Image (spheres, rainbow, N blue to C red):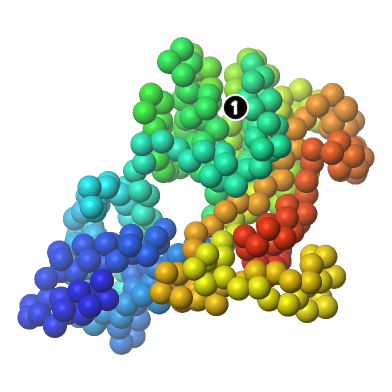
Amino acid sequence: MQTDIQDLLRRNPIPIVLLVDALIVSAYALRASDIHVAPGTHALLIRFRIDGHLIDAHQLPLTVHAEVIARLKILAGLRTDEHQTAQDGRFRFEQEDKLIDIRVSIAPTYTGENAVLRLLPIVATAPSLSTLGFSEAQQTLIHKALARPYGMILTTGPTGSGKTTTLYTLLTQLAKRDVSVVTIEDPVEYALEGITQIQTNERTGITFAGGLRSILRQDPDVLLVGEIRDTETARIATNAALTGHQVLSTLHANNAIAAFIRLRDLGVESYLLASTISLVIAQRLVRVNCTHCVVPMFADEATTALFDITIYMRSGGCKQCNGTGFSGRVGIFELLLVDSTIRDCIGDDDLETLLEVAIGSGSFVPLPVAGMHLVHEGITTPEEVIRHMHE
């Protein structure tokens, strides 16, 4: 697509509609999750986020900036005459008989309006647990939690670690014809058949907390709350789990144990956490070695000490992976299934003992150990694991 875009730029006048389409097609072909359209002093810089990393993709003449932004606004149904206010919208794009849901965020900056497009391919089904990277033992723990009639399942991790995708996969396993499933999200990332999805809108009063109250009057069996951000949402979600609902949500915490500390900081009492939380999944996303150019490497002393390994696999970069050495991403997961012993530790607010008990259970694998397993299996590199353990 580089050649196609350059061909378009040589035309006079430059066909903006075709240019925007070509940028989206180019990003989709490279498996990009986001397109950044950023005006600089001398050029319009187009960057793609691929496997979590932002790379320079194209440089366009600054003269097309206003028209590119206007075209994106038209596609997303935004005001073309407003240039000093942030605007958000979305539209659908068809590529090779595949639909892509594209979320658009436009914000005014010092050098002009900046646009970021999030590409969300519309798929018939959510990915399976094994596709996400869960081991068979971890899948068994998840199925135990899903089999419980009520309770809360939380996914934790930094922004962009795949928490929402994991929740959608769990949700599809709970969604059946005789089960009422309702979600409140910011924003709705994937449209799911047979599930009632509500998007937050602060201008109309639909917040996570307010929307959650409304959802509880909709006779749901399963609730998905996009994120627990504040005390009010935390308490409503906890009470919902306590009164016979399955509740799924995300939380910003570094690991599974930290999720309990975060909820305590939000004002949820320990005895409520002990009674309601079924499972906590902490996760990160690491890049996968390209199978076309992967080669064995000798580990240095530091790597050997950290990962207990003398040889590991690394990809040098080829046409198949666009020279990056990586192709796709996979999850590193830490699962804490709440049983009676762990429940007692949570109820007593004894989180130090909780970690010891979890490790002693045999089913709890801390994130760094799970990452080490991926390095041993040749799936990713030590540097990838180290980088994400510090997030």
Residue 284 image offset from top left, x and y in percent: 63, 54
Disc 1 secondary structure class: strand
Residue at the spot 58% in from the left edge and 31% down from the top edge = 248
Q: Quadrant of the C terminus?
A: bottom right
- Asked if residue 367 is positioned above or below residue 352 in the image, the reply reads below
Residue situated furthest left in the rendering: 12
**Residue 362 visible from this viewpoint:** yes
Q: Quadrant of residue 190?
A: top left
Residue 27 left/right relative to 359: left
Q: Nearer the viewer, residue 126 or 57?
A: 126
Q: Nearer the viewer, residue 34 or 51?
A: 51
Residue 269 left/right relative to 48: right
Q: Nearer the viewer, residue 354 or 359?
A: 359
Residue at the spot 73% in from the left edge and 77% down from the top edge = 298
- Asked if residue 236 is positioned above or below residue 167 in the image, the reply reads above
Residue at the spot 28% in from the left edge and 62% down from the top edge = 24
Residue 262 image offset from top left, x and y in percent: 73, 43
Q: Quadrant of residue 149?
A: top right
Residue 274 image offset from top left, x and y in percent: 79, 27
Residue 61 left/right relative to 334: left
Residue for badge 1: 247
- Asked if residue 157 is positioned above or below residue 280 in the image, the reply reads below
Q: Residues within 10 Å of mark 1 (few under 14, many from 20)?
A: many
Q: Quadrant of the N terminus?
A: bottom left
**Residue 258 visible from this viewpoint:** no
